[in-house]
Image: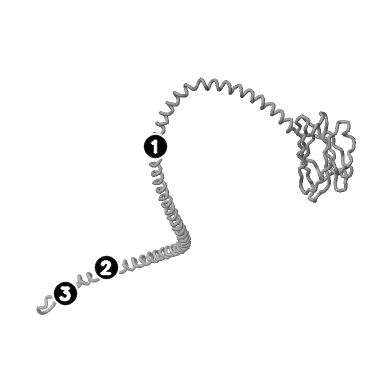
Amino acid sequence: MEHNFFVVGENRVLAFLLNNIKYILWFLIIIIAALSGVIAFLHYTGIQNQEQFKLQIDQEKTRSNSLISKLKKSSQQDSEWEQQILSQSSKQKKLKEQQESLIDRQGKELSEIKSILDQREQVVQQFQLEKTSTQIQINNLQLKVRSLQQQLLSAQASLTESKTETENVQTKISELETVISKVEQQNKKIKQKASSPVTAVKKRKPLIIDDPTITVEKLKITAKGTRVSVSYNLTNKSKKLQRGRTGMHLSSKKNLENEIQFRRQTSIPYKIKRYRVISRKFTKVKPGTFIRILIWNEKKELIFDEAHPIKR
C-alpha cells in the first residue's frame, strides 16, 4: 500500500523528499549493508593480518635467536682470530726486530766490504805502479840481454876453438874418474870394515851381580896394520853415582876362558853418573887376537867380562 504525501505551499525540496522517501530508505539500507560488509571484510582481513603478523614475529624471533647464536659463535671466532692476530703481530714484531738486526749487520758487513774494496784498490794501484817500474826494469834487462847475446856470439867463436882442447881434457878426466872410482871402492871397503858392528865372542857371567849397573855401549874397534884403537862408552844404568875400575886386554883365542886378576896398573878408574868415554891404543897386535873388556865395581868384584874380535 503506497502512501502519498502532499505538501501545501512552495517548498518543493521537501515535497520531492517526501515523494521519494521509499527510494531514499532503500538507498540508505543498501549503503548500511555495504558498509557493514566492508566492515566485516576489514575485520576478517585484520584478523588474518594479525595471524600473519604473529607468524612473521615468530619467524623473526627464530631468526633473531639463530642470529644471536651465530653472533656468539662469530664473537668466539673473532676472539680466537684476535688472539691469532695478536700472536701474529708479536711474531711480526719479532721478525721486524730480527730484520732490523740483520739490516744493521748487513750494513756493518757492507761497510767492512767497502773498506776491503778500498784497500784492494790501493793494492791494485800499488801493483800498477810496481808493474810500470818492473816494465822499465824489463826493458833495461832486455838491453842487457842483447848485449850479452853479442858477447855470447863472440864467446861461441872462441869456444869452437877450445872444443878440441876440452875433448882432450875430457879423456884425461874420464881416466882420472876411473882411478877415483877404484880408490873410492877401496875406501868404502875399509870404512865398512871399520864401521861394522862389533859382536862379542865371549860373554862371561858376572861373579856377584846378575844385572850390572855399569855396561859397555858404542864399542868401536879400528885396526890399521898392527895398530888397533879401541873406544867405548862406559854407561851407568842406575841413577846413583858409580865407582870402580875398567880395563882392556889383548887375549888369544886359547886364553879367553882364563881369568884376569885385578890390577891397578893395568886398569882405569871411573866415577860416573851417566857415561864416560874410555879409549886405548895397542901396537904390534898379532892377527887372530881379541880385545877383552873387564869392569870391576867399588868392592873390586868383577861385574863385566866380554871378548871381541879385531876385524881388519
Q: Nearer the viewer, residue 54 or 241?
A: 241
Extreme left residue here?
A: 10
Instruction: Give how far apart the Cα atoms at labels 3 and 1 are.
Output: 157 Å
Quadrant of the frame with the N terminus: bottom left
Instruction: Give how far apart the Cα atoms at labels 3 and 2 are.
Output: 23 Å
The residue that mark 2 highlights is 34
The residue that mark 3 highlights is 17
Packing grade of label 1 (10 A; few <14, some 14-19, many >=20) is few
User: SS class of the residue under badge 1?
Assistant: helix
Mark 3 vs mark 1, foreground winner is: 1
Q: Residue at x 88, y 39 (%)?
A: 260
Q: Earlier in the sequence, mark 3 or mark 2?
A: 3
Q: Nearer the viewer, residue 156 or 195?
A: 156
Q: Check contact, mark 3 vs mark 1: CB within 8 A.
A: no
Q: Earlier in the sequence, mark 3 or mark 1?
A: 3
- Residue type at tag 2: Ala
Left or right: residue 187 versus residue 273 is left
Instruction: Give how far apart the Cα atoms at labels 1 and 2 are.
Output: 141 Å
Identify the disc placed on residue 128. Answer: none
Packing grade of label 3 (10 A; few <14, some 14-19, many >=20) is few
Q: Position of residue 291 (x, y in %)?
A: 82, 35
Mark 3 vs mark 2, foreground winner is: 2
Q: Position of residue 90 (x, y in %)?
A: 47, 61
Asked if residue 73 shows in the view, the reply is no
Q: Earlier in the sequence, mark 1 or mark 2?
A: 2
Extreme bottom residue here?
A: 9
- Residue type at tag 1: Asn
Left or right: residue 259 versus residue 217 is right
- Residue type at tag 3: Leu
Q: Position of residue 102 (x, y in %)?
A: 45, 55
Identify the disc placed on residue 140. Answer: 1
